């Protein structure tokens, strides 16, 4: 592969690639994201490969393992081109039938189609699946079209044309103006205007002219995996954004800091970097423009705090991930004290889109304060778990019900948590809130990196608050007092409340302590840590009061406040639970309703798990 | 020179001065714990917080690490700042109840109760000892281990480091344990532990040189 | 008899002896020995000319590092928010009871190390227990017990223990 040394050569290459493609040729596209891998999609892909080979159809049928399609609940996912027939929950045993019926004959296999649980309607094509219908998959949509390890796939969908435009037809300042005009705000959680950050980085003085670009892929919020899926599924889109950004701010060295727990993302990113260098799209004299820029990958070490930009930079320098105060912004003095522009994975992936289609087009999407789309991970007590990309301004109701398919098992919606450990829980009364940086912040939560955890009537909000605080006490760097000691004490108080030892003044003490931790902490981890507690007290105070005043957990979660019992109406005396019980706490005559000895019961839940008659109830 | 306003009074100081120093020059004392003249500034105890006013918003910043800026408006004793300081000292008392320094600070601030469970860890992780060892003694035998609530000051593998020169500086500079004992034979790393927590089994004849004797007292051979 | 010096030197040289690469170097050392032996850390400190306490600081700050030898199987229970909401704490309690250890500990017979992880990003499968690289989804206390029993009954693989010899 000869290095490309001009914009013309890139376009010629693209034309050549497209001319060799046969859009009508049957192609089996298997989702290869980590979620589907956990479901066994690799076996499905292998089965396709061997079946295609066995039938001697390797030239006639293309097989592509793509990036994450987003509908994780229904994996393994397979899309058949050119018709774009959408099959879900595919297993290796379905493969030969798919080849025989759908690929060769064009017949649809009904049992593999998505069926809407409410309407009973079957969807043949991806676009008809309700989960996808309401989305606007501008950034994420390409995942399903490309094999992330195949450079030609990315070029075929127009990849690197934005970079070419930038390098040859735009000045760095013009690029910054375009990003400013688009009103793109950071997608990592802070929501800071990207164009302004680039501008201050470019204008910052650097004694030796060194400047850095960083991609923050240390996605730590539990329940959020959008960045991982972007890096796994379309690493070039992120890379292209970074090169454009580097050109705009005047940096020649970049880093991608990837969470250690993302091996596939690390692998695919490494492959993409190698390919980009090979094609002359990264490294010295990119596309013959005279601009040099290269990227190093750095792995995280398992520290949530390293998602904070100053801690990330400390870690890049080989030190422990201790944040420093942002009196002086990192855009002015960051990595090694040089002007550094750090952006999140999704932010970078939006850049080529804005350059290609223009800031005017981009700013039509979304709300006044929040332009463009956002990728969310919709998880928890929701029917359609997965990654969704929606325009800013869509309401929570539309996300939860129209896209998410509502709450499973007919349970009642209770709350939705956004923004990870830095965010808050929003109740049903706010379900029509438009999703937008400022609206979410006003309501006591925040956009965060995009995690959306849905909770139902069986979720205890005090337990959730305690969960987040516990998470943060372990992830705090431990340096500043309000965060280290303050969160630890918040945890003590919340633990007492969940164990029925809460005192009346505990709730106001939590509010007072939370207020100080927010204002006095050195970094944003401590600064946002009280949010889950404060928002649950704000919207679910009655639950706290029930725990404190009545020693009762309304949701039936807090172990010390609930008892496991056997419903004598439903119990058939089959004795399965008695055999499972590790404490020998269940007794009774065969075929007679059994009883749980509360003194012995440790509330492990094994009885409830094993009972086929739903006879174990929580009081 | 930089002009700023502290507690309503305008002042001029050289560039590169911290707000803590600028206030001190004016005779305004801001309480501190992790700060020590001659050592690098850490800014983590958060006791020296001051309110920085910008338009109709304000934030709390550690004055020991905040450099003066032209036109800055600082309030050292505003309600916001003192409320935060009080809570911080209350939290520290809960984790270091026997410290005379903290008790005096609390008394000065009008704190008369600790609403949190007392969990005596005998250390406020101000890092003075670490910085002293590294910067003054150029030794670096002690440092921070771990993260979060399990963060502590220690030595590599909890054994007396080769670099340790028995200077006793780490004990001396500690704001929460006030003994001046310069132990001769070190046992198990940091002189056997903070005197407030563990007996110091080093002195052949205990002269009771330290004024604050911990709850366990000295052990005499 | 382990010769940490040579292997560590090879790793350090791979990164050009660069101080900034301390974390990557420790990750590679851990890959080599399945944990961070004390003497390997000493070797890293001396070869990079960084104070040992600083290396220990880094090794104890990042959760990815283990200063104690690990078991044959690593059992990771996901405690991400989505898994928590779907009942992960009860699953963790059962795993703890079955193995008799707390998270970050290893069973006495060196068969199992228990870890908790904060989100694997496979939330549709939650609650999840990962044993080595295999994902076990939609776990409940009962199912977790069954999964562990399968591993307990399987024959032992002692290959990993070769490198756990302390000098």
Image (spheres, coloured by chain):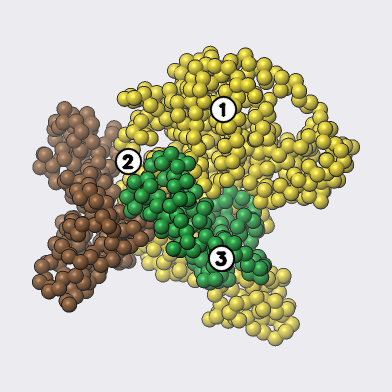
Q: Position of residue C125 (x, y in %)?
A: 64, 54
- The hue of chain C in the figure is green
Crowding near pointer 1: few (<14 within 10 Å), some, many (20+)? some
Q: Position of residue B217 (x, y in %)?
A: 18, 73
Q: Chain of mark 2?
A: A
Residue designated by label 1: A277
Quarter of the figure with the C terminus of chain A = bottom right
Q: Give the CA separation, mark 2 to mark 3.
A: 41 Å
Crowding near pointer 3: few (<14 within 10 Å), some, many (20+)? many
Residue A613 vertical placement versus B135 (above, below): below
Residue A187 vertical placement versus A19 (above, below): below
Give left or right: position of A323 versus A577. Answer: left
Q: Of helix, strand and loop, which one carries label 3?
A: strand
Report if the CB atoms under discs 2 and 3 are less than 8 Å apart.
Answer: no
Tell me the quarter of the picture where residue C87 sits: bottom right
Q: Which chain is yellow?
A: A
Residue designated by label 2: A325
Q: Is residue A68 visible?
A: yes
Instruction: Please name the residue shown 53% across and 14% down the image.
Output: A168
Residue designated by label 3: C112
């Amino acid at each position: 592969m000869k290095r490309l040394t001009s914009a013309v050569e890139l376009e010629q290459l693209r034309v050549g690639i497209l001319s060799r493609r046969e859009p009508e040729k049957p192609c089996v596209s298997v989702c290869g994201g980590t979620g589907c891998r956990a479901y066994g999609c690799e076996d499905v892909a292998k089965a396709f490969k061997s079946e295609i080979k066995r039938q001697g159809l390797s030239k006639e049928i293309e097989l592509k393992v793509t990036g994450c399609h987003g509908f994780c609940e229904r994996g393994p996912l397979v899309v058949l081109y050119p018709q774009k027939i959408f099959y879900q929950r595919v297993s290796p045993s379905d493969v030969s039938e798919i080849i025989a019926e759908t690929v060769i004959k064009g017949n649809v296999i009904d049992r593999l189609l998505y069926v809407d649980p409410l309407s009973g309607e079957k969807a043949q094509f991806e676009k008809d699946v309700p989960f996808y219908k309401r989305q606007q998959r501008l950034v994420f949509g390409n995942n399903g079209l490309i094999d992330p390890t195949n450079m030609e796939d990315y070029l075929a969908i127009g990849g690197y044309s934005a970079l070419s435009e930038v390098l040859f037809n735009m000045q760095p300042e013009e690029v910054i103006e375009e990003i400013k005009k688009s009103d793109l705000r950071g997608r990592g959680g802070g929501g800071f205007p990207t164009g302004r950050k680039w501008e201050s980085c470019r204008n910052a003085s650097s004694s030796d002219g060194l400047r850095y670009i960083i991609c923050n892929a240390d996605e730590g919020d539990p329940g959020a995996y959008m960045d991982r899926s972007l890096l796994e599924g379309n690493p070039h889109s992120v890379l292209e954004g970074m090169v454009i950004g580097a050109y705009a701010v005047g940096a020649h060295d970049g880093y991608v800091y990837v969470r250690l727990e993302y091996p596939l993302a690390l692998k695919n990113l490494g492959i993409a970097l190698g390919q980009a260098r090979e094609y002359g799209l990264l490294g010295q004299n990119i596309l013959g423009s005279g601009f040099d820029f290269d990227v190093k990958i750095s792995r995280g070490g398992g520290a949530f705090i390293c998602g904070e930009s100053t801690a990330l930079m400390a870690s890049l320098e080989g030190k422990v991930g201790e944040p420093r105060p942002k009196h002086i912004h990192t855009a002015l003095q960051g990595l090694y004290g040089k002007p550094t522009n750090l952006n999140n994975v999704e932010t970078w992936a939006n850049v080529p889109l804005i350059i290609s289609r223009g800031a005017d087009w981009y700013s039509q999407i979304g709300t006044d304060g929040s332009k463009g789309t956002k990728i969310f991970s919709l998880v928890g007590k929701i029917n359609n778990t997965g990654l969704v990309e929606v325009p800013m301004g869509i309401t929570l109701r539309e996300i939860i019900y129209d896209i998410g398919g509502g709450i499973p098992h007919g349970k009642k919606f209770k709350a939705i948590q956004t923004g990870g450990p830095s965010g808050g829980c929003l109740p049903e009364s706010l379900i029509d809130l438009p999703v937008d940086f400022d609206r979410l912040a006003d309501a006591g939560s925040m956009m965060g990196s995009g995690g959306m955890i849905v909770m139902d009537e069986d979720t205890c909000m005090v337990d959730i608050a305690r969960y987040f605080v516990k998470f943060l006490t372990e992830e705090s760097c431990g340096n500043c007092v309000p965060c280290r000691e303050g969160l630890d004490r918040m945890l003590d108080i919340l633990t007492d409340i969940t164990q029925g030892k809460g005192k009346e003044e505990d709730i106001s003490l939590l509010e007072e302590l939370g207020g100080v931790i927010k204002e006095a902490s050195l970094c944003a981890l401590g600064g946002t840590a009280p949010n889950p507690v404060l928002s649950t007290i704000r919207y679910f105070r009655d639950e706290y009061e029930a725990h404190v005043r009545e020693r009762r957990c309304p949701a039936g979660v807090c172990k010390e406040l609930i008892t496991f019992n056997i419903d004598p109406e439903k119990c058939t005396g089959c004795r399965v639970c008695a055999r499972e019980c590790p404490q020998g706490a269940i007794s009774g005559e065969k075929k007679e309703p059994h009883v749980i000895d509360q003194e012995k019961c440790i509330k492990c839940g094994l009885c409830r798990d094993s009972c086929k008659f739903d006879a174990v109830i929580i009081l | 020179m930089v002009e700023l306003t502290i507690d309503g009074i305008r002042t001029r100081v050289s560039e590169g001065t911290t707000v803590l120093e600028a206030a001190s020059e004016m005779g305004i004392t801001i309480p501190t714990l992790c700060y020590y003249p001659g050592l690098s500034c850490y800014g983590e105890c958060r006791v020296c917080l001051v309110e920085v006013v910008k338009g109709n918003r304000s934030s709390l910043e550690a004055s020991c690490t905040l450099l003066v800026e032209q036109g800055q408006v600082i309030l050292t004793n505003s309600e916001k700042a003192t409320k935060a300081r009080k809570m911080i000292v209350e939290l520290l008392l809960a984790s270091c109840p026997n410290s005379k320094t903290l008790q005096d600070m609390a008394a000065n601030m009008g704190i008369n109760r600790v609403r949190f469970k007392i969990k005596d860890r005998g250390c406020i992780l101000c890092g003075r000892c670490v910085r002293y060892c590294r910067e003054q003694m150029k030794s670096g035998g002690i440092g921070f281990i771990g993260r979060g609530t399990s963060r502590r000051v220690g030595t590599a593998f909890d054994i007396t480091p080769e670099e340790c020169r028995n200077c006793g500086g780490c004990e001396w500079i500690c704001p929460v344990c006030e003994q001046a004992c310069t132990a001769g034979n070190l046992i198990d790393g940091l002189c056997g532990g903070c005197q407030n927590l563990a007996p110091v089994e080093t002195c052949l004849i205990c002269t009771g040189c330290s004024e604050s004797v911990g709850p366990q007292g000295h052990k005499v051979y | 008899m382990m010769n940490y010096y040579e292997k560590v030197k090879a790793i350090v040289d791979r990164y050009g002896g660069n101080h900034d690469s301390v974390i990557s170097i420790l990750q590679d050392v851990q890959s080599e020995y399945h944990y961070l032996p004390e003497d390997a850390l000493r070797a890293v400190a001396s070869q990079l000319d960084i104070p040992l306490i600083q290396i220990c600081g880094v090794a104890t700050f990042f959760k990815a590092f283990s200063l104690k030898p690990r078991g044959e199987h690593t059992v990771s229970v996901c405690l991400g928010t989505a898994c928590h909401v779907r009942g992960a704490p009860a699953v963790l309690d059962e795993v703890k009871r079955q193995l008799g250890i707390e998270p970050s500990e290893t069973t006495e017979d060196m068969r199992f190390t228990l870890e908790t992880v904060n989100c694997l990003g496979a939330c549709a499968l939650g609650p999840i227990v990962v044993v080595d690289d295999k994902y076990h989804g939609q776990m409940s206390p009962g199912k977790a017990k069954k999964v562990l029993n399968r591993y307990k009954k399987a024959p032992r693989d002692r290959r990993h223990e070769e490198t756990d010899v302390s000098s």
